């Protein structure tokens, strides 16, 4: 396990040396990785740092409001509404790797725009060790590693938690006294709901996935999963009232893990699964059925794409 005090000292020193007197922006998503990177960078260079949260339209329910509340202490926080630009960029894209590359490039272009506006030469981001392993091992390109475009208009990218696993990042978050809503929050993929929607990303599918993920997180919280969510995987026939419907199929996933490198599907109680399916199908008229994914990692990855 990581020596948190030693790590914090070394990370803040590294950030100061990397930035010197130059300004930087931090790619802030609200997850524990980017939040720890932001807290370390803010501690290291203060006013030289501008936190930037990009609302991609691919985020969890209430994410943007949560970001504003959690990071209100950073006066320079910028919230960028890029929902329309991301959805347009993803139009017609169905391949998972292409999705990640499209999202990675769009993120960088948003950050470059903000960097020009704040005279920032560097980008700080919350890449962690499993992100690098999966990208370099050709398992999947993470939007902030293998998904980055070749041409980037930054003098340098600073990644203070790049050698840590998720559980170690959480330890650092606790040592930094970050709120539990950050330090204990379930992992959420950088590309967001785009990788929880199989095939082309549309506004309708995103709405279904966002609602279903919210239901799953609420219902399984008492079972302490490492990660739990829902994904829109296709369409199927169902019956609502006296009418046939051709609605979305939602797959529910809940896993136990230590660091995300391997995972086991949780053996959730039948009553919990029934509450989940009842809420998802009952609260969204466009959902025809709900299934539960019992596959471990390996052979599956945790996310669907």
Image: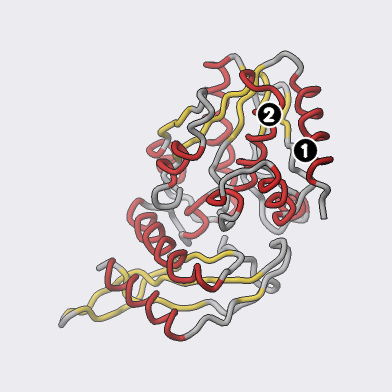
- Model colouring: secondary structure
In percent of width and height, residue 234 lies at: 41, 69
Give the quadrant of the N terminus: bottom right
Q: Residue at x 65, y 39 (%)?
A: 148
Q: Which residue is drawn at 48% across and 50% down?
A: 93
Q: In screen coordinates, is 36 left or right of 107?
A: right
Could you say which quadrant of the image residue 299 lies in?
A: bottom right
The residue carrying mark 2 is 43
- Residues 212 and 300: in front is 212
- In terms of secondary structure, where does tag 1 sit? helix
Q: Residue at x 68, y 30 (%)?
A: 41
Q: How many labels does the image show?
A: 2
The residue carrying mark 1 is 8
Q: Going by the picture, which residue comes out furthest to the bottom? A: 270
Structural crowding at the residue carrying mark 1, measured as other residues with C-alpha within 10 Å and reported as few (<14), some (14–19) or many (≥20): many
- In terms of secondary structure, where does tag 2 sit? helix
In percent of width and height, residue 97 lies at: 60, 52
Q: In screen coordinates, is 56 left or right of 152?
A: left
- Residues 91 and 141: in front is 141
Structural crowding at the residue carrying mark 2, measured as other residues with C-alpha within 10 Å and reported as few (<14), some (14–19) or many (≥20): some
**CA distance for labels 2 and 1:** 10 Å
In percent of width and height, residue 124 lies at: 67, 31
CB under 8 Å between discs 2 and 1: yes
Q: Is residue 244 above or below residue 122?
A: below
Give the quadrant of the C terminus: bottom right
Q: Is residue 2 above or below residue 302?
A: above
In percent of width and height, residue 138 lies at: 73, 55
Q: In screen coordinates, is 301 left or right of 4?
A: left
Could you say which disc has been placed on residue 73 in the image? none
Give whichever of discs 2 and 1 has the lower sequence position: 1
Q: Residue at x 81, y 22 (%)?
A: 17
């Amino acid at each position: 396990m990581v020596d948190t005090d030693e790590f914090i000292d070394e990370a803040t020193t590294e950030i100061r040396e990397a930035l010197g007197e130059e300004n930087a922006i931090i790619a802030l998503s609200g997850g524990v990785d980017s939040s720890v990177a932001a807290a370390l960078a803010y501690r290291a260079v203060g006013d030289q740092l501008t936190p930037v949260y990009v609302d991609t339209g691919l985020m969890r329910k209430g994410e943007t409001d949560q970001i504003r509340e959690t990071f209100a202490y950073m006066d320079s926080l910028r919230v960028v509404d890029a929902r329309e630009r991301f959805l347009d960029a993803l139009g017609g894209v169905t391949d998972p790797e292409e999705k990640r590359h499209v999202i990675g490039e769009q993120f960088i272009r948003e950050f470059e725009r903000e960097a020009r506006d704040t005279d920032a030469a560097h980008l700080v981001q919350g890449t962690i060790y499993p992100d690098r392993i999966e990208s370099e091992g050709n398992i999947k390109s993470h939007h902030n590693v293998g998904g980055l475009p070749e041409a980037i208009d930054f003098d340098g990218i600073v990644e203070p938690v790049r050698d840590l696993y998720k559980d170690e990042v959480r330890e650092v978050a606790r040592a930094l006294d970050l709120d539990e809503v950050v330090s204990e929050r379930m992992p959420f993929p950088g590309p967001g709901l785009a990788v929880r929607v199989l095939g082309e990303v549309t506004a309708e599918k995103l709405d279904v996935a966002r609602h279903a993920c919210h239901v799953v997180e609420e219902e399984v919280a008492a079972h302490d999963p490492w990660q739990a969510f829902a994904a829109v995987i296709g369409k199927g026939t169902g019956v609502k009232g006296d009418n046939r419907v051709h609605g979305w199929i939602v797959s529910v996933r809940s896993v136990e893990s230590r660091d995300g490198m391997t995972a086991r599907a949780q053996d959730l109680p039948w009553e919990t699964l029934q509450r989940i399916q009842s809420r998802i199908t009952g609260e969204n008229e466009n959902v025809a059925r709900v299934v539960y994914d019992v596959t471990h990692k390996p052979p599956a990855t945790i996310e669907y794409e």
